[in-house]
Image: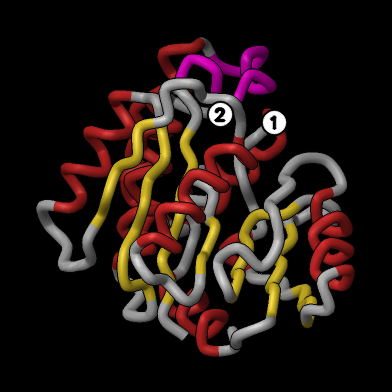
Amino acid sequence: MNATAIIPVKRFGAAKRRLLDAIDPPARAAIVKAMLADVLTATTACDAVERVIVVTGEGRAEKVALATSQRVRTPIEVMRDPDDAGHPEAATLGIVRAKALGAECALLLPGDCPLLDSAELHAALDRAAPGRVTVVPDRHGTGTNALILSPPDAIAPGFGAGSRERHVERAERRGLEAAVEELDSLALDLDTPDDLRELAEVLAAEPQRAPTTAAELARLGLP
């Protein structure tokens, strides 16, 4: 199933505060920017993604999106989010826009899963169907790193602690099929120093999986 991808991005200064003990704010912002570039590259390389909507109040994220749009065929649109109220709120803004554009399926993605693999994403979208909600958990099994919704407003997104079960319950309450699918390339998001070490180890061995992030980590000498 073809989908409109929605990627909410916080202002870099407010992002990844749990990493403060490991890296300083400029380095944190640089990593967030690099991860977004890799996520956009992987997302636009997936033939089942018909367009991408980046929802952000961060000018640097907007520049990354516009720079990516100049070298890919998939349309990328930036929705400005001046309030930066939170991930669920930004995702909802994107859903409203996707519906206005006639999308039949919405793919909610984070900007901090740079290992995202376009082939794995394509396979997940192939399994999507009307009336089905796909919940992609994080590596801890309790959070949500992606949602596939058909129709785009099948459920209200409710990211955060315990969101895997919350999304499943919302789908079942509406009489929709709820599928939990573990996707290896979407399991690791970057929130904590442990996540940073895990990501650095993966990219030290396989930098081609997220080349922009790998180069930034190497430049910063992290972790």
> Within the image, what quadrant is residue 192 found in?
top right
Q: Nearer the viewer, mark 1 or mark 2?
A: 1
Q: Nearer the viewer, residue 204 or 83?
A: 83
Q: Where does the image place residue 191, in percent across and percent down from the top left?
A: 66, 34
Task: Residue 15: say if magenta.
Answer: yes
Tell me the kind of residue under disc 2.
Pro
Q: Which mark is residue 223?
A: 2
Position of 89 relative to 91 (above/below): above
Q: How many marks?
A: 2
Tell me the kind of residue under disc 1.
Thr
> Within the image, what quadrant is residue 31 found in?
top left
Task: Give the magenta range.
Answer: 12-23
Q: Nearer the viewer, residue 171 or 199?
A: 171
For numbered disc 1, what is the local secondary structure?
A: loop
For numbered disc 2, what is the local secondary structure?
A: loop
Left or right of residue 77, residue 182 in this image: right
